[in-house]
Amino acid sequence: MSRILVVEDESAIAELISINLRHAGFEVTLAGSASQAQYEVDRVLPDLVVLDWMLPGQSGVALARQWRGAARTKELPIIMLTARADEGDKIAGLDAGADDYVTKPFSTNELLARIRAVLRRKAPEALDSAVEVGPLLLDPGTRRVSRDGVEVKLGPTEFRLLHFLMTHPERVHSRSQLLDRVWGDHVFIEERTIDVHVKRLREALERVQCARMIETVRGAGYRLTQQSSVLSA
Protein backbone atom coordinates (compact mmCIF):
# COMPACT_ATOMS: atom_id res chain seq x y z
CA MET A 1 0.00 0.00 0.00
CA SER A 2 1.49 3.33 -1.09
CA ARG A 3 1.93 6.07 1.53
CA ILE A 4 0.79 9.52 0.38
CA LEU A 5 1.48 12.69 2.37
CA VAL A 6 -1.06 15.44 1.62
CA VAL A 7 0.22 18.89 2.60
CA GLU A 8 -2.79 21.21 2.52
CA ASP A 9 -3.84 23.90 5.01
CA GLU A 10 -7.49 24.03 3.89
CA SER A 11 -9.08 21.24 5.91
CA ALA A 12 -12.06 20.71 3.56
CA ILE A 13 -9.77 20.18 0.56
CA ALA A 14 -7.41 17.99 2.57
CA GLU A 15 -10.29 15.80 3.72
CA LEU A 16 -11.69 15.52 0.18
CA ILE A 17 -8.33 14.37 -1.14
CA SER A 18 -7.85 12.01 1.81
CA ILE A 19 -11.22 10.30 1.35
CA ASN A 20 -10.63 9.71 -2.36
CA LEU A 21 -7.08 8.47 -1.88
CA ARG A 22 -8.09 6.05 0.87
CA HIS A 23 -10.97 4.80 -1.27
CA ALA A 24 -8.42 4.14 -4.03
CA GLY A 25 -6.33 2.03 -1.66
CA PHE A 26 -3.67 4.51 -0.55
CA GLU A 27 -2.48 5.11 3.00
CA VAL A 28 -2.84 8.84 3.70
CA THR A 29 -1.20 11.24 6.16
CA LEU A 30 -2.28 14.88 6.39
CA ALA A 31 -0.15 17.92 7.22
CA GLY A 32 -1.48 21.46 7.49
CA SER A 33 1.80 23.35 7.48
CA ALA A 34 5.36 23.15 6.16
CA SER A 35 6.76 22.33 9.59
CA GLN A 36 4.25 19.51 10.08
CA ALA A 37 5.03 18.21 6.60
CA GLN A 38 8.75 18.17 7.40
CA TYR A 39 8.02 16.34 10.65
CA GLU A 40 6.04 13.65 8.81
CA VAL A 41 8.75 13.23 6.17
CA ASP A 42 11.41 12.96 8.89
CA ARG A 43 9.29 10.37 10.70
CA VAL A 44 8.48 8.12 7.73
CA LEU A 45 9.45 8.81 4.14
CA PRO A 46 6.24 8.69 2.05
CA ASP A 47 5.97 7.25 -1.45
CA LEU A 48 4.63 10.56 -2.78
CA VAL A 49 3.72 14.06 -1.55
CA VAL A 50 0.75 16.15 -2.73
CA LEU A 51 1.96 19.65 -1.89
CA ASP A 52 0.10 22.96 -1.72
CA TRP A 53 1.96 26.16 -2.60
CA MET A 54 0.56 28.53 0.03
CA LEU A 55 1.29 27.13 3.49
CA PRO A 56 1.73 28.61 6.98
CA GLY A 57 5.36 29.32 7.77
CA GLN A 58 6.98 28.31 4.48
CA SER A 59 5.80 27.97 0.90
CA GLY A 60 5.38 24.62 -0.77
CA VAL A 61 7.84 25.69 -3.46
CA ALA A 62 10.51 26.41 -0.82
CA LEU A 63 9.76 23.08 0.83
CA ALA A 64 10.07 21.22 -2.49
CA ARG A 65 13.38 22.93 -3.17
CA GLN A 66 14.58 22.01 0.32
CA TRP A 67 13.65 18.34 -0.20
CA ARG A 68 15.35 18.20 -3.57
CA GLY A 69 18.53 19.51 -1.99
CA ALA A 70 18.66 16.82 0.71
CA ALA A 71 20.13 13.39 -0.02
CA ARG A 72 17.35 11.52 1.80
CA THR A 73 14.50 13.24 -0.07
CA LYS A 74 16.03 14.19 -3.42
CA GLU A 75 14.08 11.42 -5.20
CA LEU A 76 10.82 11.98 -3.29
CA PRO A 77 7.94 12.19 -5.81
CA ILE A 78 6.11 15.55 -5.47
CA ILE A 79 2.90 16.79 -7.07
CA MET A 80 2.12 20.48 -6.58
CA LEU A 81 -1.60 21.13 -6.05
CA THR A 82 -2.34 24.86 -5.98
CA ALA A 83 -4.65 27.66 -7.10
CA ARG A 84 -1.70 29.46 -8.70
CA ALA A 85 -2.38 28.77 -12.36
CA ASP A 86 -0.16 31.29 -14.18
CA GLU A 87 2.45 29.90 -16.52
CA GLY A 88 5.21 31.53 -14.47
CA ASP A 89 3.96 29.82 -11.31
CA LYS A 90 3.89 26.43 -13.03
CA ILE A 91 7.43 26.91 -14.26
CA ALA A 92 8.56 27.96 -10.78
CA GLY A 93 6.93 24.91 -9.21
CA LEU A 94 8.44 22.48 -11.70
CA ASP A 95 11.85 24.16 -11.49
CA ALA A 96 11.70 23.79 -7.70
CA GLY A 97 11.51 20.03 -8.15
CA ALA A 98 7.83 19.13 -8.53
CA ASP A 99 7.22 16.10 -10.77
CA ASP A 100 3.77 17.36 -11.77
CA TYR A 101 1.63 20.47 -11.28
CA VAL A 102 -2.17 20.39 -10.79
CA THR A 103 -4.23 23.56 -10.45
CA LYS A 104 -7.35 24.17 -8.32
CA PRO A 105 -10.21 23.64 -8.84
CA PHE A 106 -9.24 20.09 -9.73
CA SER A 107 -10.81 16.75 -10.62
CA THR A 108 -10.14 14.07 -8.02
CA ASN A 109 -10.07 11.45 -10.77
CA GLU A 110 -7.41 13.42 -12.63
CA LEU A 111 -5.39 13.85 -9.45
CA LEU A 112 -5.52 10.09 -8.81
CA ALA A 113 -4.42 9.42 -12.39
CA ARG A 114 -1.50 11.82 -12.05
CA ILE A 115 -0.48 10.26 -8.73
CA ARG A 116 -0.43 6.81 -10.32
CA ALA A 117 1.51 8.14 -13.31
CA VAL A 118 4.20 9.72 -11.11
CA LEU A 119 4.45 6.56 -8.98
CA ARG A 120 4.83 4.42 -12.10
CA ARG A 121 7.60 6.69 -13.30
CA LYS A 122 9.50 7.29 -10.06
CA ALA A 123 8.49 4.58 -7.59
CA PRO A 124 7.09 1.54 -9.42
CA GLU A 125 7.44 -0.66 -6.35
CA ALA A 126 4.83 1.50 -4.58
CA LEU A 127 2.05 0.44 -6.95
CA ASP A 128 -0.22 -2.54 -6.37
CA SER A 129 0.03 -4.10 -9.83
CA ALA A 130 1.24 -7.69 -10.15
CA VAL A 131 4.93 -8.27 -10.89
CA GLU A 132 6.37 -11.20 -12.84
CA VAL A 133 10.04 -12.06 -13.07
CA GLY A 134 11.02 -15.36 -14.65
CA PRO A 135 8.69 -18.05 -13.27
CA LEU A 136 7.71 -16.03 -10.19
CA LEU A 137 4.48 -14.04 -9.96
CA LEU A 138 3.88 -11.62 -7.09
CA ASP A 139 0.50 -9.93 -6.54
CA PRO A 140 0.61 -7.11 -3.95
CA GLY A 141 -3.18 -6.80 -3.97
CA THR A 142 -3.73 -10.35 -2.68
CA ARG A 143 -0.25 -10.61 -1.09
CA ARG A 144 0.40 -13.88 -2.89
CA VAL A 145 3.53 -15.25 -4.52
CA SER A 146 3.37 -18.24 -6.83
CA ARG A 147 5.12 -20.27 -9.49
CA ASP A 148 2.97 -22.02 -12.08
CA GLY A 149 0.00 -21.80 -9.73
CA VAL A 150 1.89 -23.18 -6.72
CA GLU A 151 1.73 -20.65 -3.90
CA VAL A 152 4.80 -19.66 -1.87
CA LYS A 153 4.13 -18.89 1.79
CA LEU A 154 6.03 -15.79 2.95
CA GLY A 155 6.06 -13.70 6.09
CA PRO A 156 5.32 -9.95 5.82
CA THR A 157 8.99 -8.90 5.83
CA GLU A 158 10.06 -11.53 3.28
CA PHE A 159 7.12 -10.48 1.08
CA ARG A 160 8.22 -6.83 1.12
CA LEU A 161 11.81 -7.84 0.43
CA LEU A 162 10.85 -10.01 -2.54
CA HIS A 163 8.51 -7.29 -3.84
CA PHE A 164 11.32 -4.77 -3.87
CA LEU A 165 13.78 -7.15 -5.51
CA MET A 166 11.24 -8.14 -8.18
CA THR A 167 10.48 -4.52 -9.03
CA HIS A 168 14.23 -3.87 -9.41
CA PRO A 169 15.47 -7.07 -11.10
CA GLU A 170 19.11 -7.59 -12.08
CA ARG A 171 20.23 -4.62 -9.96
CA VAL A 172 22.61 -5.10 -7.04
CA HIS A 173 21.38 -3.63 -3.76
CA SER A 174 23.60 -3.15 -0.73
CA ARG A 175 22.37 -4.13 2.71
CA SER A 176 21.98 -0.47 3.68
CA GLN A 177 19.91 0.20 0.54
CA LEU A 178 17.64 -2.75 1.28
CA LEU A 179 17.32 -1.58 4.87
CA ASP A 180 16.14 1.89 3.75
CA ARG A 181 13.84 0.76 0.94
CA VAL A 182 12.25 -2.33 2.52
CA TRP A 183 12.26 -1.60 6.25
CA GLY A 184 12.18 2.20 5.97
CA ASP A 185 14.81 4.64 7.13
CA HIS A 186 12.88 5.20 10.36
CA VAL A 187 13.56 1.63 11.51
CA PHE A 188 16.84 0.94 13.26
CA ILE A 189 18.10 -2.64 12.91
CA GLU A 190 21.51 -4.09 12.19
CA GLU A 191 22.43 -4.67 8.55
CA ARG A 192 23.24 -8.32 9.24
CA THR A 193 19.53 -8.79 9.97
CA ILE A 194 19.08 -8.49 6.19
CA ASP A 195 21.02 -11.74 5.78
CA VAL A 196 18.59 -13.54 8.09
CA HIS A 197 15.57 -12.46 6.05
CA VAL A 198 17.29 -13.28 2.75
CA LYS A 199 17.97 -16.78 4.13
CA ARG A 200 14.30 -17.17 5.08
CA LEU A 201 13.22 -15.93 1.67
CA ARG A 202 15.48 -18.41 -0.08
CA GLU A 203 14.17 -21.25 2.08
CA ALA A 204 10.60 -20.36 1.11
CA LEU A 205 11.48 -20.07 -2.59
CA GLU A 206 13.33 -23.38 -2.52
CA ARG A 207 9.96 -25.13 -2.33
CA VAL A 208 9.26 -23.97 -5.89
CA GLN A 209 12.88 -24.28 -7.07
CA CYS A 210 13.41 -20.50 -7.22
CA ALA A 211 15.87 -19.96 -4.37
CA ARG A 212 18.75 -19.41 -6.81
CA MET A 213 17.02 -16.34 -8.19
CA ILE A 214 18.27 -14.48 -5.08
CA GLU A 215 21.94 -14.02 -5.80
CA THR A 216 24.64 -12.89 -3.36
CA VAL A 217 27.12 -10.47 -4.92
CA ARG A 218 30.20 -10.73 -2.74
CA GLY A 219 31.18 -7.43 -1.17
CA ALA A 220 28.20 -5.62 -2.69
CA GLY A 221 24.88 -7.08 -1.57
CA TYR A 222 22.03 -8.99 -3.22
CA ARG A 223 20.15 -9.04 -6.49
CA LEU A 224 17.27 -10.94 -8.01
CA THR A 225 18.02 -12.45 -11.40
CA GLN A 226 16.14 -14.49 -13.98
CA GLN A 227 15.94 -18.18 -13.06
CA SER A 228 17.04 -19.24 -16.54
CA SER A 229 20.23 -17.19 -16.41
CA VAL A 230 21.13 -18.63 -13.00
CA LEU A 231 20.66 -22.24 -14.13
CA SER A 232 22.71 -21.74 -17.28
CA ALA A 233 25.58 -20.01 -15.47
Image: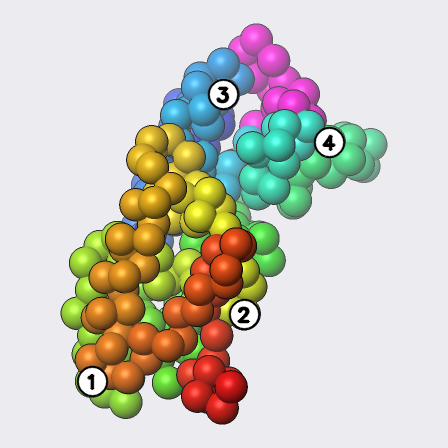
Tell me which corner region of the image, top left, top right, bottom left or bottom right, holds residue 32. top left
Determine which residue is flagged by label 3: 38
The Cα–Cα distance between marks 1 and 2, rounded to whole angstroms, is 24 Å
Q: Which mark is residue 96?
A: 4
The number of callouts visible is 4
Tell me which corner region of the image, top left, top right, bottom left or bottom right, holds residue 145. bottom left
Frontmost of labels 2 and 3 is: 2
Looking at numbered disc 1 in the image, what kind of residue is underneath it? Val
The Cα–Cα distance between marks 2 and 3, rounded to whole angstroms, is 34 Å
Frontmost of labels 3 and 1 is: 1
Where residue 193 appears, x then y in whole percent?
A: 30, 45
Determine which residue is flagged by label 2: 170
Looking at numbered disc 2 in the image, what kind of residue is underneath it? Glu
Q: What residue is rendered at 31% in x and 64% in y? A: 140
Q: Which mark is residue 84?
A: none
**Crowding near the residue tagged with mark 1, few <14, some 14–19, many ≥20 C-alpha atoms within 10 Å:** few
Between 105 and 20, which is closer to the camera in this rendering? 20
Q: Earlier in the sequence, mark 1 or mark 4?
A: 4
Q: What residue is rendered at 44% in x and 88% in y? A: 231
Q: Inspect the magenta stretch and tell me whether residue 63 lies in it.
A: yes
The Cα–Cα distance between marks 1 and 4, rounded to whole angstroms, is 48 Å
The Cα–Cα distance between marks 3 and 1, rounded to whole angstroms, is 44 Å
Q: Is residue 164 left or right of residue 104?
A: left
**Crowding near the residue tagged with mark 4, few <14, some 14–19, many ≥20 C-alpha atoms within 10 Å:** some
Determine which residue is flagged by label 1: 150
Q: Earlier in the sequence, mark 3 or mark 1?
A: 3
Residue 181 visible to an observer of this rendering: no
Query: Which stretch appears magenta?
Result: 52-66
Q: Earlier in the sequence, mark 1 or mark 2?
A: 1
Check the image and name the residue furthest to the right.
88
Q: Secondary structure at mark 1?
A: strand
